[in-house]
Amino acid sequence: MILERYLTIGEVARRSGVAPSALRFYEQRGLIEAQRTGGNQRRYERTTLRRIAFVRTASRLGLTLDQIADALATLPDGRTPTAEDWRRLSRRWRGLLDERIAVLERLRDDLDSCIGCGCLSLERCTLQNPEDRAAALGPGPRYLEGDSPSDVGGGT
Amino acid sequence: MILERYLTIGEVARRSGVAPSALRFYEQRGLIEAQRTGGNQRRYERTTLRRIAFVRTASRLGLTLDQIADALATLPDGRTPTAEDWRRLSRRWRGLLDERIAVLERLRDDLDSCIGCGCLSLERCTLQNPEDRAAALGPGPRYLEGDSPSDVGGGT
DNA sequence: CCTTGACCTCAAGTGAACTTCAACTTACAG
DNA sequence: CTGTAAGTTGAAGTTCACTTGAGGTCAAGG
């Protein structure tokens, strides 16, 4: 007999906005877990929704799934995490966000001065400073946020 | 034009900080071009350095190479681009940057209020608002679910 | 002439975060 | 009991921006 009402993967997907395939993927990566029915189907505890919320939010902030897994590993083992547990983890994002905003603002200022001269000179322009590159956005294009940048890139 | 000193791919790589393999890749994607020697080696015009600077900077701002190619396509055909040409293109980045910064700031504010409660609640938390999410990641995760997670009141 | 280092092409690999596919199996309403 | 929606697996595919590797050529100095 099932006292607690567990959630199927479809229910979790609907309520979290995360596709079933992504949930399976998260499980594979050790981010979430599930019970199984006799017929091998996943059944999620309700607290998993909060865990997924954490993962999605951290992901939006630009953390990799590995980093998120690390953060989740600091949660208490035996018991269901409390609000304070989640608070503790979330607080760490604050600094990260501040940093990223600062990097973008610096980039914007540099851009302003470069628009002034139109140079994009490799020798002089701050925009071309390789040191900044590491700090900027990590590898590859991370569009953290949505813009359909197509209206800037031109075309269509 | 015969007097112009052309640059080898290695020289361009050193001066631009972009790896030779990346330069070949950019060429393949139509972002830059080069003359060839009798022995089929690339020789770059000096103005190519500025073009590469543009590509790298736009890339740092989060534009895809396709979008950058579109932008470059608006440069005048016949002549070497002037400082004003580059200025015109760069100006369009300004708005993009502003937008991105604004989004991150909003996210930070939301985070602040969420840290207050530690909830990360799917029902209440702005951070979990699916509308934001659609805008969040551009290409990539596609959810086929059209449901809003606002069903079932009581919750956890 | 010979060696060495820079260069060439094309194909395949990388990594992040998923999605899609094929080929089943399970859960449950009627 | 049966039809079917929803679930299962593992492998492979996707996108982006490159890098790496194999196998070969070119340019320049001694």
Image: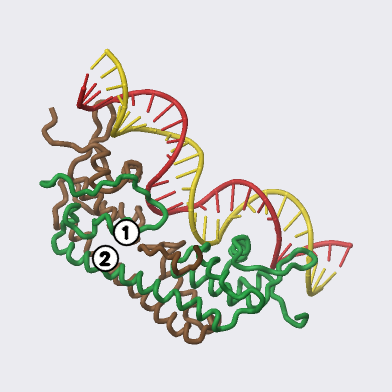
Chain colours: A brown, B green, C red, D yellow
The vertical placement of B129 against B20, above or below, is above
Amino acid under disc 2: Leu
* Residue A26 percent coordinates (x, y): 33, 45
Q: Quadrant of the N terminus of chain B?
A: bottom right
Label 1 crowd bin: few (<14), some (14–19), many (20+), radius 10 Å:
some
Mark identifier at residue B107:
2
Of residues B91 and B37, the one nearer the viewer is B91
Residue B23 picture location, percent across and down: 61, 66
Find disc 1 in the rendering and name its residue. A60
Image position, residue A91 (x, y; %): 22, 64
Asked whether the residues under the numbered discs 2 and 1 touch, taking CB atoms below 8 Å apart as contact, a structural biologist would say yes
Q: Is residue B82 above or below residue B28?
A: below
Query: Where does the image place residue A51, in percent across and percent down from the top left?
Result: 23, 50
Residue occupying the point 55% across, 80% down: B85
Viewer-side residue, B33 vs A132: B33
Q: Is residue B85 above or below residue B56?
A: below
Q: Secondary structure at mark 1?
A: helix
Which residue shows up at 17% across the image and 65% down it?
B113
Q: Which quadrant would residue B100 be assigned to in this image?
A: bottom left
| Residue depicted at x 61% and y 63% | B30
Report the side of D14 relative to A3 (left or right).
Answer: right
Q: Are marks 2 and 1 in one subunit?
A: no
- Between A78 and A51, the residue placed more toward the observer is A51
Chain of the residue on which disc 1 is drawn: A
